[in-house]
Image: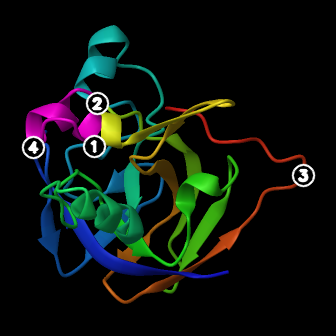
Amino acid sequence: MMGRVEAVHRAPTHAFSKSSVDEITLVAGLGVEGDAHHGAEVRHRSRVARDPSQPNLRQVHLLELERLRTLADQGFPVAPGRLGENITTEGLDLIDLPLGTLLRFRSGALIAITGLRNPCTQLDTFAPGLMEACLERTEAGLIRKAGVMAVVLGGGPIAPGDSFDPALPPAPFRPLERV
């Protein structure tokens, strides 16, 4: 089980989409260098308004290229970075991984998955109907399909073409929940 980095992105301000770049640098305990969500405490604007001292469990946003392709096939104007992810991946279904899964990149950078990105109304501002398209309703409940969030445990550069390996946490596995 291995994944590959398709593209990397960052934005210095709280913009919905992020610019694609040749490389990003992950900084342990902080996130993506030069990104608006870089920091030990929460940076998401609505969470800062509630309690700015909360730990930042959303330092890095990852989204699968396969998910972007599904959304594009449904007519949405999506492409890597347009939905605000820092790392667009390919080859590994991230939302099915358990809480605490570690992803080790070729550079030695290490992140831990903290939960699911919660789709918000900004998606509908970007493209009407996109929020609903990022949700799946099942008998078991609501499945959020807008990517996963992670914290940086070990820093290093990440670039398109890099591979990464998941390391599952000890059983029993806990499913991802929104963060």
The answer to whether marks 3 and 2 mark residues whose Cβ atoms lie closer than 8 Å is no
Residue 171 is labelled as 3
Q: Which residues are magenta?
A: 120-131
Q: Quadrant of residue 177?
A: top right
Alpha carbons under labels 4 and 2: distance apart = 11 Å
**Nearer to the camera, 64 or 112:** 64
The amino acid beneath tag 3 is Ala
Was residue 129 drawn as part of the magenta stretch in this picture? Answer: yes
Q: Nearer the viewer, mark 3 or mark 4?
A: 3
The amino acid beneath tag 4 is Thr
Does dot 3 land on a helix, a strand or a loop?
Answer: loop
Q: Residue at x 36, y 89 (%)?
A: 161
Does dot 2 land on a helix, a strand or a loop?
Answer: loop
Question: Of label 3 and label 1, which has the lower sequence position?
Answer: 1
**Nearer to the camera, 159 or 52:** 159
Q: Residue 44 location, x and y as percent?
A: 29, 30
Alpha carbons under labels 3 and 2: distance apart = 31 Å
Alpha carbons under labels 3 and 4: distance apart = 39 Å
Question: Of label 3 and label 4, which has the lower sequence position?
Answer: 4
Question: Of label 1 and label 4, which has the lower sequence position?
Answer: 4
Say which residue label 1 marks: 37
Say which residue label 2 marks: 44
Mark 1, Cα crowd under 10 Å, few <14 / some 14-19 / many 20+, is many
Alpha carbons under labels 2 and 1: distance apart = 7 Å
The answer to whether marks 3 and 4 mark residues whose Cβ atoms lie closer than 8 Å is no
The amino acid beneath tag 1 is His
